[in-house]
Image (cartoon, rainbow, N blue to C red):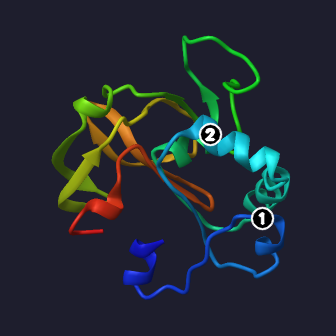
Amino acid sequence: SAYWRKKGADTFEVRQLADLGRGMDLLALPGGESTVQGKLLKDLGLFDPIKKLIEGGLPVFATCAGLILLAERIDDPGRRDDTRPEKWFGVLPVAVKRNAYGRQLGSFTTIGKWDGIPDTTMTFIRAPSITAVSDGVEVLSTFDGQPTSVRWRNITAFTWHPELSATA
């Protein structure tokens, strides 16, 4: 939320159901650990209300783990159980693979083009990859031929961290 405040936005963290009553113009789903985030959203009773807001057209800006929460499918060869579902919100018609660019020590920065803006710094931290994109999803950036950010309806989502870019 420091990123958004720096951009002049009035921000607040959603930590309980009552916070959703404050109203918002945009929902930012941050990076982090998607399994923990998804489980907390469910445990706190936030999951279904947030999903309804997204499906109702609330603009969403998601990075890294936020993208995983939104994806229609998670291509994860790991074990499936209640904490690692095949999808969370399932509102963005893409498939993702967790940690596709390596673990924390494999994090890296590259320069690419984002939404027509050349020389954009892209920082990948334990980043997922987008393994499939459905019709109608606009690819905004790529790395090694793989989509790394997309836009669909009210959702803009990144595998990398644009908040760490000087051009963001």
Q: Does residue 57 lie above or below 157 as drawn?
A: below
**Could you tell me which residue is drawn at 51 percent across and 55 percent down?**
30
- Residue 35 spot, x, y in % from top left: 62, 35
- Residue 36's tag is 2
Q: Is residue 89 visible?
A: no
Q: Does residue 67 lie above or below 19 as drawn?
A: above
Q: Secondary structure at mark 2?
A: helix
Q: Does residue 132 lie above or below 59 as drawn?
A: above
* The C terminus lies in quadrant: bottom left
**Could you tell me which residue is drawn at 56 percent across and 12 percent down?**
78
**Amino acid type indicated by mark 1:** Gln
State yes or no: discs 1 and 2 in contact (Cβ < 8 Å).
no
> Left of 129 or right of it: where is 56?
right
Rendering quarter of residue 12: bottom right
Mark before the other along the chain sequence, 1 or 2: 1
In this orientation, which residue lies closer to the viewer: 41 or 155?
A: 41
Q: Does residue 69 lie above or below 55 as drawn?
A: above
In this orientation, which residue lies closer to the viewer: 106 or 115?
A: 106
Q: Residues within 10 Å of mark 2 (few under 14, many from 20)?
A: few
**Could you tell me which residue is drawn at 70 percent across and 25 percent down?**
85
- Residue 75 spot, x, y in % from top left: 55, 20
Q: Residues within 10 Å of mark 1 (few under 14, many from 20)?
A: few
- Residue 155 spot, x, y in % from top left: 58, 57
Which residue, given by chain and number where applicable, does mark 1 sit on? 16
